[in-house]
Amino acid sequence: MALSPDPSPTLVPAVAALRRFNRFYTRRMGALDPHYMGSELSLVEARILYEIAVGEPALAKQIQRELGVDAGYLSRIIGKFVRRGWIARGRGVDARERPIVLTDEGRAAFAALDARTFDQTAQLLGGLPDPDMATLSAAIDWIADRLGRAGSEPYRVRTWAVGDMGMITARQAILYHQVYGWGSGMEALIGEITAAFIRGFQPGREQCWIAERAGRMMGSVFLVAEDERVARLRLLFVEPEARGLGIGADLVARCVEFARAAGYREIVLWTHAVLTSARKIYAAQGFTVESVETHDDFGKPEVSESWRLRLTA
């Protein structure tokens, strides 16, 4: 497909960077060698053996769909594996429906190839310090996610860790500036809240939850102590690309559950009328608006709201 006459100014260098990395990695890992990892197999044959090993009993149609290989080519490779005694095939309506499993010889061949692949990859990474390896892992997951590995890949929720507060402050400040035009006042407020949370964190009484997908922060929320009876929900945030997954509702529900377990009687929060998605989540949990006012703390007039949820009668 040809590029549009006027592509994005970032597209051409991004394409060049990705192609440059592909050339580096395929050469470094020997992917172009006709004998992958010193075995008797090509890269494609090794990948098909992998799909059988991790998916057994596997179906030819599933492998074809996963890898996008030609049906005839796949059939010839499977036939080659049968002749070598690496796989056995069960009964099925047709060849593409017959379950495929590894024989003992096939498992031994796969185990040897898998071990060589692990060792060579480990050698490539072995010189990196642990923080760099963690960063690399997260970057690889992020790239795969952004290029469409699994848009529906589930998210996970964890409690906060070192480094999260800076990321939360940066992402929220950037997003609110881009979408609503809120300036440095908003960034200062978020920074003050996150710094105060770290300095005065009360385990069992306060918590911050982070939603992640493919190693990337997708959302966050805080529950902090207002006083002995009242908790405050703060800084609910979901990345635009992750909206519709239920992350916001999940995070707020965790705040409510935690507050009840901690013995709070009420939860309060402060939000803005323009944050319609968040307001719907609060209302669904039973929060109600108690007061409304207008301020210009973020560089322009905004309607703010104070909400409350009573946890006990």
Image (cartoon, rainbow, N blue to C red):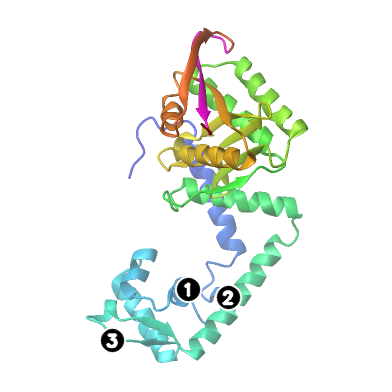
> Going by the image, does 171 lie left or right of 164?
left
Q: Is residue 194 above or below residue 261?
A: above
- State left or right for residue 221 relative to residue 74: right
Residue 35 position (above or below residue 108): above
Which amino acid type is marked by label 3? Answer: Arg
Q: Nearer the viewer, residue 298 or 84?
A: 298
- Check whether the beta carbons of the residues at disc 1 and disc 3 lie within 8 A of each other: no
Task: Decide whether residue 299 is among the magenta residues.
Answer: yes
Q: Nearer the viewer, mark 3 or mark 2?
A: 3
Amino acid type at circle 1 is Val
Image location (x, y in percent) of residue 86: 45, 87
* Of pointers 3 and 2, the one earlier in the residue sequence: 3
User: Which of the 4 quarters of the picture holds residue 196?
Assistant: top right
Specify the segment rendered in magenta.
298-310
Label annotation for residue 54: 1
Q: Is residue 30 visible?
A: yes
Which residue is at 29% across, 75% downward? Answer: 72
Q: Which residue is mark 3?
A: 91
| Closer to us: 208 or 55 | 208
Residue that numbered label 2 is attached to? 114
Give whichever of 113, 104 is nearer the camera. 104
Q: Earlier in the sequence, mark 2 or mark 1?
A: 1
The spot of residue 187 in percent (x, y) is 63, 21
Q: Which badge, 1 or 3, is on the more N-terminal residue?
A: 1
- Distance CA(mark 1)–CA(mark 3): 20 Å
Q: Could you tell me how far apart the alpha carbons at marks 3 and 2 are, in whole angstroms? A: 28 Å
Circle 3 crowding by C-alpha within 10 Å: few under 14, some 14–19, many from 20:
few
Which structural element holds mark 2? helix
Residue positioned 28% across, 77% down in the render: 97
Q: Is residue 249 left or right of residue 68?
A: right
Which SS does the magenta portion mostly show?
Answer: strand
